[in-house]
Image (tube, rainbow, N blue to C red):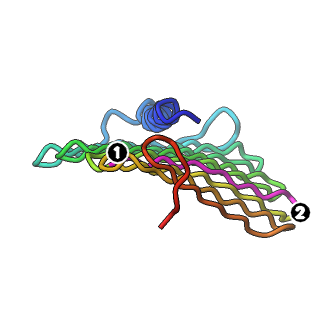
Amino acid sequence: MHTLAHRSLLLSAASAAIAIAASAATPDAQAGALRYRGANASGGISSGAVVRRQGPDGGSLARGRALSTDGQGHGTVARGALVTGPNGGTGARAGTTSLNADGSASHRSGLVATNARGSVQSSGSASRDAAGNVSQSRSTTATSNVTGNSVQSSSSYDSATGLTRSATCYNAAGAVISCR
């Protein structure tokens, strides 16, 4: 995925998780932290939390979590976080995990981080079916702002076939170079 689109997607997902949790928070929650919990229309519970912090040197953190069950053994949790460092570095992470009554589960997550030295983007997913078969994949790209060089790595796992990993490095012009 294009780096800018990937970053926008992650920032949107992290912001959405924080907003979902904040939207149902009670007005009497403590300053800096909002929490809620209650029954929902699906016969389960919904809960969540939002935490916002500001550092003395200008850094900030906002993170949110929203959980929902349906009373029949299914549940989903979404988490997101946005962080800004005092020197301009930024990071965002978002993830969603779903569990089902039959024992199956799925997870998707990703992160982006940038500072003066470079950037990293990573996204992945994992799933388990009702029989216990597992599959996983993750893709990561890191780029140096100093050299312009980058590395793209990927890994995948399937309980039937095992683990596969690969990495390819590129120079600033996009030509493949040796990874060290």
Which residue is at the front of the view, 169 or 78? 169
Q: Residues within 10 Å of mark 2 (few under 14, many from 20)?
A: few
Q: Quadrant of residue 2?
A: top right
Q: Residue at x 43, y 32 (%)?
A: 19
Residue type beneath disc 2: Ala
Q: Residue at x 74, y 55 (%)?
A: 127
Q: Which mark is residue 153?
A: none
Task: Check residue 142 for magenta coloring.
Answer: no
Q: Position of residue 81 (x, y in %)?
A: 40, 45
Q: Which mark is residue 131?
A: 2
Q: Residue at x 79, y 63 (%)?
A: 158
Residue at disc 2, secondary structure: loop
Vertical relation: 46 (above or below) 5: below
Which quarter of the figure is the N terminus placed in? top right
Which residue has dot 1 on it? 114
Residue type beneath disc 1: Thr
Q: Which residues are magenta?
A: 118-130
Task: Check residue 126 for magenta coloring.
Answer: yes
